[in-house]
Amino acid sequence: MNVVFVSRVQMNPYVTLLAAAMEQIAPGVTCTIRDDLSPCWLWRKRREIDVLHLHWTELLYASNTWRGAWRKWLRFISGLGLAKLASARIAYTVHNLEQHEGRYSLLNRTANALLFKVADIVHVHDERTRAAVAERFGCQRSLVVIPHGNYMSYPNTCSREEARARFGIPQQTFVYLALGQIRPYKGIEELLKAFGRLPGRDCKLIIAGHVHDPAYGERIKALAAQDERVILSLAYVPPEEIQYFMNASDVCVLPYLHATTSGAAILAFSFGKPVIVPRLGDFPQLVGERRGLLYNAQDPHALLNALRQARQFDLVSASAEAFALARELDWRVIARQHLQVYAGTLEHKSRKKHEGRER
């Protein structure tokens, strides 16, 4: 089986981990990762692709201008049409129901409408997203639920003491961490304002990650400068450095304004870190009552209250529960589930082709 993954995301190893696990458990499977859906490439390879698996498709036509987005969108739609004509099985993983920044929503809605119509497999990570996709796009037949894999492949060898020494943080200090790409929908401004109202000098907030928009980065810097307890690192965190931020912290805070699936929560669990999250997306299912704290995103005081409550939370038990769930989310198990779905749709394709010849 020849599987081609299409993804422009480089900072998240999701696709790389899935492809590697597939090739590890099934020697007859070959996986290729591409960052575009080039019509010319698709035409040349049309007889070699069994499954075309798309991820974060909105990034394939992302641009700073409407004209640029329109050109890339036409290229994407053309590639999708060629893949369908070539009889490749098309799979699509729904990472986000909407674009995070809401740009070019018309192009996104049109692309989604077509994508959900032509996809042979629509993959979601949880039941809540399955219900939302079925209701919004009416694609019950092709929907499959396979969970998001863990990030336990990241290095994790440093101790809490070593990690804290790196940032100059005393061992008795309570540390909150917000790690990941710094974008408006992740609620970092709201977190800084809530943390600013949190009393006590024996706590720290670390905010670390790549900033997409420099202007937004300046707003974050200005807010962080108002509180000397905030440690700010607005830069891409390499995989080998993630362990220092995680192991220096007591709890991860993900104050998202909207969410579908959050790899950030699973990243925290992969390091045994409980989370503070809003009651949005798949967070309630992931966190439950044991792996962190849920708060009402509509309540303006809820995040501050959750930050306070974390100081009294049983972090030892929550950490063990979080790590146990991460271990269950083994990429080899998840890859096997994907391959079974691929095989099923390829078998259906072969059967229909055979029936057509008989007629």
Image (cartoon, rainbow, N blue to C red):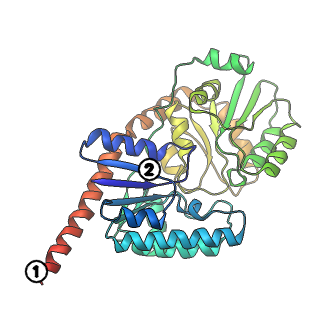
State the residue lying farthest toward the left. Answer: 358
Residue at the spot x=49%, y=34% of the render? Answer: 270
Q: Earlier in the sequence, mark 1 or mark 2?
A: 2
- Locate residue 260: give its quadrant: bottom right
What residue is rendered at 63% in x and 15% in y? 162
Q: Amino acid at mark 2?
A: Ile
State the SS at label 2. strand
The quarter of the rendered structure image containing the C terminus is bottom left
Q: Give the residue drawn at x 60%, y 73%.
A: 107
Proximity of marks 1 and 2: CB atoms separated by less than 8 Å:
no
Q: Position of residue 253 (x, y in %)?
A: 65, 40
Q: Quadrant of residue 87?
A: bottom left
Q: Whole-Å distance between the Cαs marked 1 and 2? A: 37 Å
Q: Which residue is mark 2?
A: 33
Q: Is residue 84 above or below residue 285?
A: below
The x and y percentages for residue 113 are 50, 75
